[in-house]
Amino acid sequence: MIGVVSGLAGVVLSKAISLISEYAFAKYTGIDLNTGQIVSISILTPFIVALGGLLSGILTYRFAPEAEGHGTDAVIEALHWRAAVIKPRVPLVKLTASSILIGLGGSAGKEGPIALIGAGFGSALSEKLHLTSAERRMMVLAGMAGGISAVFKAPLGAMLFALEVPYKRDMEIEAVLPLGVSSIVAYVISISLTGVEPLFTLPGVKVSTTVSGISYYALLGIILGLTARLYVRVFYTVRDIFKKLSVNPMVKPAIGGLVTGAIGMMLPQVLGQGYPFLQQAMYGKVAWTVMLAAALGKILANSFSVASGGSGGVFAPSLFIGGMMGGALAKLYTNDPSIIAASTVVGMAAFFAGAGKVPFTSIVIVAEMTRGYELIVPSIIAVTLSYVIAGQETIYEKQVDTRTDSPFFLKELGEKLLRQIKVKEIMTREVVTVKPNWTLRRVIELIAKTHHMGFPVVEDSRVVGIITQSDVLRVRFEELDKVRVRDVMSKNVVAVLPHDSLEEALRKMLRYGIGRLPVVESYETMKLVGIVTKKDIVKAYEELRFLM
């Protein structure tokens, strides 16, 4: 049911944007956002984009303030903080407001709106069926996957997106089955009504497996990781500026739209979703200077359109920015369309991986959208580096690191597990330890051998400190054989007792920002008897849920 409804909603959203763009934007501005043709650029352009922002703001703030912004964050927030409850009116308001904003030239995408629309139906259906909060989470994620599958014709990528996007470094693995069903059903609905053609077509692409080719994609990943950091900071700086504006919230998207339209007067490529212009770039029909300017302009345009409170997504802008940056870099040294297209596609995946913290999704969904499956290997190289370089920066500010950082997950753990199980029941008793007089070189060798990121420092069976990989990395390479563990270890040891509950253990982990705790016989003797990690707690939770 969720797949059918989210699939139909995806088709309706796409058609509505296309029709509004054709009859209410291209007619008065001379810019056809559906085909990428620019006949002329009317002086009315900024005012029409502002009108889209105004109408979007009125609809959003009058009927459903939760629909503000790019939508995906609203779903993530509902999953972590609101027991996956989304008010029934939100999807309809989001559908209408987003269609108007994007159709009238707002620099935004369909991913956020359709994610919220599909998730909203999943939440509403769960309420009707009186499902539990855990089951409702599955339905919300299934709605998100279904909607994205429909609009991007990428069922596997959509499923991965819904699994990955709630977290920076985790996945909702147990949701694979319902997400897979919803995603496939929505995809079938979409292609039945709109055809099977992918969103982008590619010329024949060339994939270089030489050292220079691999180095090029590594460089591209580094550049896009840094650009992703810039994008996130600009986006939320603009958001903070608009929050401080002493004007009616309904008017703020209109102001953002006016600025977006002004940018569009100089760079019409940044208006709307930008897909036709990105398609032109893939065929090498756009100068590198225009591509670079359009990528940087899109960062500003998307920020003013959406961070001002407008209703639209950040996925399409991310693809546009990454694709244009990749194409511009390639065109600096070649006019070969096959190389430019390859660089554009890899750029799309790498940038979104860095900005959205969804590496698996980025690789797969871009491959599905372009049918550029032969580019998966270079995409992995660029995506990995972009993801690492971007660090903790994310365009989805409601993401949490892992499930153990999710308030919903912690609440569920607290109810079912944390107070019931003692640390001694799940702790690891055979603990890998280090001595205070060891050199850091020896610690590095131990990290490489065990893949553990931290170790208790033990002397005469007593825990006297903790040393982690980050402690070692602060020391210069040439000093590793001289510096001892005692010189860099943390001497303020946070520990737990065997009879403490997992609730107490997890509370200490969260309070001090650590992922492991030594288990000691008593705080007086500090004799080591085991170690417990966040992963141990999650594993215990999963095993208990399976048994229940």
Image (tube, rainbow, N blue to C red):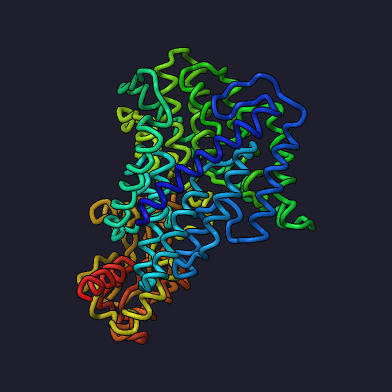
Q: Residue furthest right?
A: 246
From the viewer's side, name the closer residue of 55 and 475: 55
Q: Residue at x 35, y 56 (%)?
A: 1
From the viewer's side, name the closer residue of 364 and 393: 364
From the viewer's side, name the closer residue of 504 and 159: 159
Q: Residue at x 71, y 24 (%)?
A: 41
Is residue 163 found left or right of 91 in the rendered image?
A: left
Residue 461 x/y as whole percent: 26, 76
- In terms of image quadrants, where is residue 531? bottom left
Indicate whether 474 appears above or below 544.
above
Q: Residue at x 42, y 75 (%)?
A: 508
Q: Residue furthest top?
A: 335
Residue 162 x/y as whole percent: 39, 52
Indicate whether 291 appears above or below 131.
above
Is residue 467 found left or right of 289 in the rendered image?
A: left
- In terms of image quadrants, where is residue 455? bottom left
Residue 306 x/y as whole percent: 62, 47
Residue 280 x/y as whole percent: 51, 21
Disc count in the image? 0
